[in-house]
Structures are given as structure tokens and as C-alpha cells.
Amino acid sequence: MMEDLEKTVERCRSGDQAAWAALVGATVKPLYRLCASFSPTAAVAEELTQEVYLKLWENLDRYQEGSSFMAWAWRVAKNLLIDAHRKSRRERDAAWLDPEVLDRLPSTDDPAKTAERRQRLELVEQGLRQLDQELAELVLLRDFAGMSYSELAEAMDLPLGTVKSRLNRARLDLATAVRRRLEIRPIRTSEATAPGGVS
């Protein structure tokens, strides 16, 4: 996959429009999830995805062979995404709470479980607003946008161990914030997991 992307990027750099269409087709799902994780509404997520692709097109000459496309996309589009995330904090919603986006995420056919999942996501979104910006970004990138630990390390220019320890702290702080909203006892470190049970 990485080799195919690198070859496609090289063709894009030479002005091959078909290659650009192929690159978008190969990356639009994870890139949309990345944008949706930082957007206040699904409509904004769609617009932001288009803006990010425009920015990527303008910076294709800076993509380094052998690097993660998603990590590079995050670095290139970071300011756009963070601005959108700040807006989502003010507007009290995030795109991944919109039914349109929830339908695109892995889910269950059980309506009761779907409703419960949405309620949990709403609590998580409220908890994210209480985290430091950097910690909130880590949770969004890993647990909602689906970036791997190695991609996070590359995107943020941090050692892998540092990424894991900060993410653990972010999850713990987030879980504590959610528990407080539910007026439940403080969470223990051993109970910290990703939102929705992802570890």
C-alpha cells in the first residue's frame, strides 16, 4: 500500500490527473475520518476534507518517500484541523456525533446499542473539552481518526514511547472527566482505556 501511494504521488507530481483521482480514492475514507474528528458538523467535515486535499495538492513536493501519508497529511493540514476543533469546542458538538457520520463508522444493527453508543460519544465529546489541547488531539487522532501509534509518533515528531505515555494520560484524564459528569467515583489508572473500549 505504501509503495503504491508513493508511486501515485510521484505521478501526481508530474501532473497526472488520473493519479490524483486515484490518490484521493485510496485515502478519502481515513482522511474524512480525520477531518470529521476535528469538525463541529458533518457539513464542515466535508468542506474541511476538500480544503485539506487542496492543501495536500499544493504541498505534494514536500512529501517524503517512505513516510506515512496520513502522518504527513496531519502535519500539512494541522492548522486547518485545529481551527475546526476549536470551533467544535465552542459549538458544543463534533461531526462524529452527527447521525450521518455515525452511519459511516463501524457500528451494530442493534438500535439500543447504537443509542447507548451515541450517549457515550456525547459524554466523551464533553470530556474532550476539558483536556489540554495536545492531549485532546492525541485521543482524536488515535481513537477516532484511527491513526496508528507509529503514525502519531511520525506526525508529532515524538518518540513512540512518549506518544504511548501521553495517550495513556489523555485517556485517563478523559475517563476521569466522563466519570465526574456521571458523578461516579474517580477512575483508577488500571481502568483507563480508549473511548468506546478501544485499547
Image (cartoon, rainbow, N blue to C red):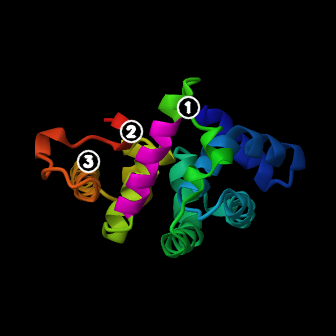
Q: Residue at x 55, y 74 (%)?
A: 87
Majority SS type along the magenta span: helix
Q: CA distance from mark 3 to mark 2?
A: 18 Å
Q: Which residue is mark 3?
A: 164
Q: Earlier in the sequence, mark 3 or mark 2?
A: 3
Residue 198 visible in the snapshot: no
- From the viewer's side, name the closer residue of 56 and 47: 47
Q: Amino acid at mark 3?
A: Lys
Say which mark, if any, is on residue 196: 2
For the record, the magenta segment spans: 115-128
Count of numbered tags:
3
Q: Which residue is mark 1?
A: 106
Q: Position of residue 32 (x, y in %)?
A: 65, 50
Q: Position of residue 79 (x, y in %)?
A: 54, 73
Query: Does residue 25 appear left or right of residue 88 in this picture?
Result: right
Residue 99 visible in the snapshot: yes
Q: Position of residue 137 (x, y in %)?
A: 41, 61
Q: CA distance from mark 1 to mark 3?
A: 24 Å
Q: Earlier in the sequence, mark 1 or mark 2?
A: 1
> Is 123 contained in the magenta span?
yes
Query: Which mark is in front, 3 or 2?
Result: 2
Q: Residue at x 27, y 40 (%)?
A: 193
Q: Are marks 1 and 3 in contact (CB under 8 Å)?
A: no
